[in-house]
Amino acid sequence: MKFREPLHELIKLPTDFMGEMNFPPPEKIKIYDSTLRDGEQTPGVAFSPGQKYTLAVALSEIGVDILDLGFPMAALSDRRALQRIVQGKRKGEIREDVELLVMCRSNPKDIDVTIQTLREIDVDVNEITFFIFTSGSDLHLKYKIGKTLIKVMGRDESEWLDLPVEFYREANLKLMCDAIRYACDQGVESIEFGGEDGSRADIEYTIQLAKSGYEAGATRYSFPDTVGCLTPEGVDHYIPRIVNEFPGEDIVVHFHNDFGLAGINTIRAMSHGITVPTCTINGMGERAGNAPLHEVVVGLKLLYGIDLPRFKYEKLRDLRKLVEEYSGIPVSANTPIIGEGVFIHESGIHTAGILIDKSIYQVIPPELVGGEIKFVFGKHSGIAAVKAVLEKPIYQDGLARDGVELTTELLEAITLFVKDARQKRTRSDSFVNITEAYYREYEQLGISELRLVELASTIGRLMKEGLFKPNVDNDKG
């Protein structure tokens, strides 16, 4: 139906409530995907080198700008994946402008091993961004890496609990800046840096850490919500201060999703001028995952009018299915934007509205993200949807061959039948087998605690007998 009035006169649009915001120009936004590192840290998930390469190609095609490839020195399979991805970029199978990133802790050994690893697989350090990270909050500084910081400063470990947090703050700056300067001395030109648990850190120390990192030679600061507890108000506390301190710099945000806020927090941070949002496909990641790629890019476009010029939104559902296949973890049917059920309608009230115009009940255009509106029929169905489906040209020929005429009487009979049939099924339907099968398979993605104990007993016995030799990494895929 063609409306007589412009849509914006009939309804309030999300963009009507934006007010004064500082979104960067769309062409300056760089989408940073961490599926191949943080996404793979989802419990039980492991991607083969071949799968990582396929995902890297798909992420390049959809329009992602930065790929986090994790720790190449950690596993042979990760080194193989990195090598294949770099070669794919050289051959043009991955866009030339896609930035590849690897991670290091703040110590020379990690940097040396990473550089050596890159050389062994014929990768120049200048083809890669090094992410050199440390900790940011006082909790992490004193109680997570405190003993390391004591050694850095040449103090005795017995002083650990007695030293004030100020000592650990200073030691941490030295640790990080020494590592950054060391990487620069080794010829590394592109260096991202940041402190874990930034969303629970003191804001003044956070800014001091960022300033120190830039002064040491790093090129891009990353602010993380490591434990996913940041609120939109917390974003307003940290991000404007950070952006104002470093005008013109690309700054990364990396938010986890423990309260389901990572997507909107990421967009909120961008409204304060952040140019580099970190996401993962399907929101994969540790615990509750990371900011979901689909929520961030489609939210930016439809709720805030930020249309990313290089991004191919219509590939989002195909990307979802690819990661489901490789990870073994399907998204919920009602997952926003990409879920299998979000464009399916049953309710008679809803379907009647949809048949007038999609915008009455559907804000996200299905075709934008590679979906389509469908109807299912059951106890909530109305005659309008039954009629609309049966009148589709693809079904008309078959009905005509059977001599069926779509009369009002027939449509009413069909509608009553499907309502009754679905209602009767509720007396016998049980989905316990389906749900039990799902969780049984989910629990088998990784090795359980009980299975680990069994393995320890078996392998320990075989090693004593000289019958077992560890195979560190046999992943050839």
Image (spheres, helix red, strand yellow):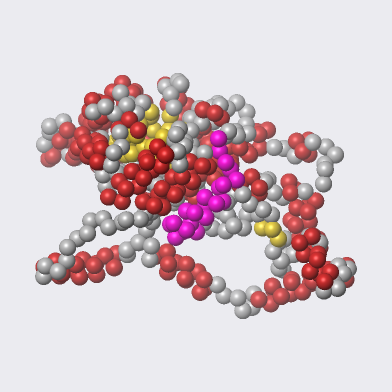
Image vertical order of residue 405 relative to residue 170, above or below: below
**What secondary structure prevails in the magenta region?**
helix
Residue 399 included in the magenta stretch of the image: no
Q: Give the range drawn in magenta.
A: 310-330
65 on left or right of 356 = left
Whole-percent x, y for residue 175 in the image: 23, 31
Say if residue 258 shows up in the picture. no
Residue at the (33%, 43%) spot, across then down: 83
Q: Quadrant of residue 238?
A: top left
Whole-percent x, y for residue 13 in the image: 69, 37
Whole-percent x, y for residue 4 in the image: 85, 39
Q: Quadrant of residue 129?
A: top left
Say if residue 132 shows up in the picture. yes
Quadrant showing the C terminus: bottom left
189 on left or right of 435 = left
Residue at the (48%, 57%) spot, across then down: 324
Q: Which of 435 and 218 is in front in this view?
A: 218
Residue at the (19%, 67%) spot, across then down: 459
Whole-percent x, y for residue 247 in the image: 45, 20
Image vertical order of residue 429 relative to residue 351, above or below: below
Q: Which of 121 and 304 is in front in this view?
A: 121
Residue at the extreme front: 91
Residue at the (32%, 26%) spot, across then down: 189
Q: Which of 366 and 263 is in front in this view?
A: 366
